[in-house]
Amino acid sequence: MSDLNKLGLAEARDALRKGEVTSVELTESCLKAIDDADALNAFVHKTPEIALERAKAADARIKGGDAPSMCGLPIGIKDLFCTKGVPSQAASKILEGFKPEYESTVSQQLADAGAVMLGKLNMDEFAMGSSNETSVYGNAVSPWRRGNDDAQLTPGGSSGGSASAVAADLCLAATGTDTGGSIRQPAAFTGITGIKPTYGRCSRWGIVAFASSLDQAGPMTKNVRDAAIMLEAMCGHDPKDSTSAELAVPNFEAMLTGDIKGKKIGIPKEYRMDGMPAEIEKLWAEGAEMLKAAGAEIVDISLPHTKYALPAYYVIAPAEASSNLARYDGVRYGRRAQLAQGDGITEMYEKTRAEGFGHEVQRRVMVGTYVLSAGFYDAYYNRARKVRTLIKNDFEDVFAAGIDAILTPATPSASFGLGEMTDADPVQMYLNDVFTVTVNLAGLPGISVPAGLDKQGLPLGLQLIGRPWDEGDLLNTAYALESAAGFVAKPGKWW
């Protein structure tokens, strides 16, 4: 078999079980693809020795007949996950040289399941960004191009390296994290599938924190079946994470029947934004028709507090970031600034943080500190928390009325060029999250499925939002949508 790196998780698993291919061969194919794709800047810490060692162990395990679904499958790990003995910088200068002595729960579970780690993936610094342009490693680049234009495009953010690597077949799948859309938006931009599970479904232990009440890990894969396989390996209760849910993890793959007859799919009127591109509007309408043709009932619904979601998110997330990032001070680990004669501890904090944090992180820390300050706490932070409750209640009311899933666009546009938005008002960049942040504020599961191309040949995604803890049903609805959309486009290789 040639081009083994182009396989998905399910195809590769089945080939491994049949003895048609070994994990070492799969891994070597991915390692070669990674070495040939430095132009994408997706992998920022390569770990070929670890990969080949794990691949050999996986082959032995498969031979012995004791192999879970993920065994022997080569994947990438976002740089936000702590990986023992391997640099874990959260794409920030302030964590330069940090090699954890421990493994995050999610990456450990994947390793225990036999998955092969190929290396660490690029991302926005501390997961703050929608275009992967705030990374200390430089921009991650999308494998897609607009028509015959050779301008570099963003793979989305913050999980841009993960999205780029999966779309370019550098790995079979990758981990991502989603605080306000950081799995679903890059998945939509690069024509892959990305699911953010219910808050609490995957452990956050060992994942560098951005906003603790919003962060959630999830898989980024080539299709819905692969997402089901990888999600099952990532989920599970973790006593080390107080927000981790003590719930059994179902066999998500077994729930992919494609049968959605009688399911009620809600179409929220509030997601029809002024100035939404006609292509996005058309794709959304086509998605609803596809689900209707598959036997679902399409219902118009209202989520009245949606318009307050973005401002509430950009108060709550920076507030939590300001608190979480206070620990980076040059004392225990990571970078410490050079101090002048006579500098005290205050100067050390100031210089280290000024040098170590990029502009976007500094901006959000300052916003967060401001909204938490004594004079403004009630005016901003407390009010945003109340709005968050109203947004959560909107979803609860809709689900209580019998809606099974909600269909919306995943992003307000297709991928844009690197540098096109960085000089603009930062709010323009924040608007990329307009369809995704509500899901994080309400703690719900959401999935982005590639559903079409825009007139320039770039992928567009649709988002499905599910009931809490009902990832199995959500994945099945996504599977039906994927089957109907029949999206098979791949980027032309230029790198």
Image: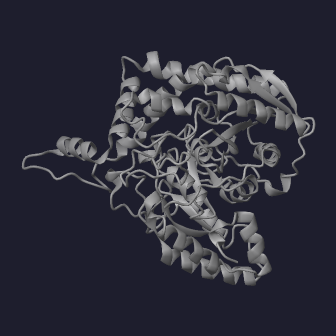
Q: Residue at x 34, y 47 (%)?
A: 328
Q: Residue at x 39, y 45 (%)?
A: 134
Q: Quadrant of the N terminus?
A: bottom right
State the image coordinates of residue 436 (x, y, percent, origin top left). 61, 34
State the image coordinates of residue 388 (x, y, percent, origin top left). 59, 25
Picture quadrant where residue 325 is located: top left
Relative to 475, say whether 36 is above or below: below
Q: Residue at x 68, y 84 (%)?
A: 60
Question: 399 left or right of 106?
Answer: right
State the image coordinates of residue 226 (x, y, percent, origin top left). 72, 58
Q: How is the image coloured?
A: one colour
- As rendered, which of 286 and 70 lies closer to the eye? 286
Question: 438 left or right of 226?
Answer: left
Asked whether residue 41 appears in the rendered view, the answer is: no
Relative to 169, say whether 387 is above or below: above
Total marks shown come to 0
Asked whether residue 351 appears in the rendered view, the answer is: yes
Relative to 218, say whether 278 is above or below: above
State the image coordinates of residue 161 (x, y, percent, origin top left). 50, 54
Most extreme residue toward the left, as rendered? Answer: 341
- As rendered, which of 223 and 317 lies closer to the eye? 223
